[in-house]
Image: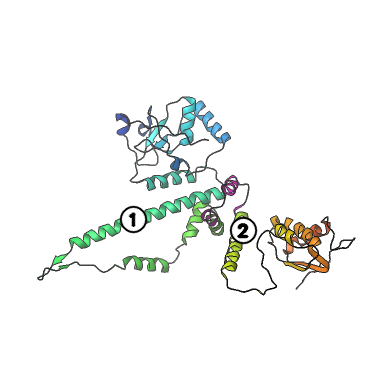
């Protein structure tokens, strides 16, 4: 569904203004049929995953056959909080939508409501649930900051109102030392039994294990490509696989950063070359290398590297030289096949062969 269509908002009618509902469930008297144009807030619409076209057509057909049973929930400014799908279905069917107004004190509470009401309603895969819960965490964090700021203002007002004047006209304010009440509460909370970690509670709400939630959250924080995120949202790729890929990239970046910032001086006869080994090795003279020693990543998606290794070795190694590589135990037989079936010659030999050595300790 395309949620990027935004309708201009009209003023609330007298009838609509008179209705503000703060309960989750509406009675028939709470629901209105409105002719006013409802407004789509793009940020609100993007908080929850979009349904598929087939799901949308099913809902649209249901409304056509049975009418709109569930009202669209809007705020007093006529911004849709819940029911974007029902809104578009009614619009296409030329039906006047039924709405219910919910009033919240802030936009953060509106966002929180949107996630809460949709979290258990939709059929979401694990990563979609993690993504939704992470958004909820961010909202909770903002609300917590606001509560602390509001509490600080209230405390400052109380302390200021409690000031007293002394004989030498100096103003003395009581309770000016920072309170350690919050610290005591934190200590008491950490000591109390049965208290779950924040990540455990978040994982429980997302219906995944704490480790899966941690990996999904780290993926979101590391901001991978939109293509990878969409694959996760569609369920085309597992959270664990993307997490491993990102971790490998992070480790490689860390090693490169450490190497560039180190003060280690290499001997004059040693040159450090950074980059894609297939491309960089094109600049190295053929049959000039005595040893290739390497440790590629062990994941199965890196198997093609061993084919490249065989080709590079066949060009660069001298007669009697060696290619020594580590490999994952579970992939060793596949790697042996790749190396043996590579369409290359080793050195100047007319009968290419590989000698496979294995450390069985």
Question: On residue 147, which mark appears?
Answer: 1
Secondary structure under badge 1? Answer: helix
Report the residue that reaches farthest toward the right: 350
Magenta-tinted stretch: 217-239
> Mark 2 — residue?
244
Question: On residue 85, which mark appears?
Answer: none
Q: Quadrant of residue 167?
A: bottom left
Q: Quadrant of residue 6?
A: top left
Height in image: 203 above or below 18?
A: below
Q: Nearer the viewer, residue 125 or 224?
A: 224
Q: What's the residue at 68%, 69% (across, down)?
A: 271
Q: What's the residue at 49%, 49% (across, down)?
A: 132
Residue 337 colored in magenta in the image: no
Residue 222 colored in magenta in the image: yes
* Sequence-first disc among 1 and 2: 1
Q: Position of residue 212 (x, y in %)?
A: 56, 56
Q: Position of residue 331 (x, y in %)?
A: 74, 60
């Amino acid at each position: 569904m395309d949620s990027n269509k935004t309708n201009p908002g009209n003023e609330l009618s007298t009838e609509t203004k008179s209705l503000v509902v703060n309960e989750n469930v509406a009675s028939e008297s709470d629901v209105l049929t409105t002719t006013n144009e409802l407004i789509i807030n793009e940020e609100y619409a993007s908080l929850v995953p979009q349904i598929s076209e087939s799901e949308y057509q099913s809902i649209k057909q249901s409304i056509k056959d049975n009418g709109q049973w569930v009202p669209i929930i809007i705020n007093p400014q006529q911004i849709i909080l819940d029911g974007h799908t029902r809104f578009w279905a009614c619009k296409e069917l030329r039906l006047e939508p039924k709405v219910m107004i919910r009033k919240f004190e802030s936009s953060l509470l509106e966002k929180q409501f949107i996630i809460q009401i949709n979290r258990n309603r939709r059929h979401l895969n694990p990563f979609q649930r993690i993504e939704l819960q992470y958004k909820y965490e961010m909202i909770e964090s903002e609300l917590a900051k606001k509560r602390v700021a509001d509490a600080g203002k209230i405390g400052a007002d109380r302390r200021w109102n409690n000031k007293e004047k002394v004989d030498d006209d100096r103003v003395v304010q009581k309770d000016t030392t920072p309170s350690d009440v919050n610290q005591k509460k934190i200590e008491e909370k950490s000591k109390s039994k049965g208290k779950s970690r924040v990540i455990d509670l978040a994982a429980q709400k997302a219906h995944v294990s704490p480790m899966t939630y941690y990996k999904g959250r780290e993926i979101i924080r590391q901001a991978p490509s939109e293509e990878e995120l969409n694959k996760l949202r569609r369920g085309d790729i597992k959270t664990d696989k993307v997490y491993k890929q990102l971790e490998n990239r992070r480790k490689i970046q860390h090693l490169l950063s450490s190497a560039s910032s180190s003060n280690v001086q290499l001997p004059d006869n040693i040159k450090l070359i950074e980059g894609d080994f297939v491309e960089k090795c094109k600049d190295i003279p053929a049959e000039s290398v005595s040893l290739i020693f390497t440790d590629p990543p062990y994941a199965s998606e890196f198997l093609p590297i061993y084919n490249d290794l065989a080709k590079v070795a066949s060009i660069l190694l001298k007669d009697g030289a060696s290619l020594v590589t580590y490999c994952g135990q579970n992939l060793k037989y596949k790697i042996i096949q790749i190396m043996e079936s590579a369409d290359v010659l080793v050195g100047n030999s007319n009968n290419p062969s590989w000698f496979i050595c294995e450390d069985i300790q």
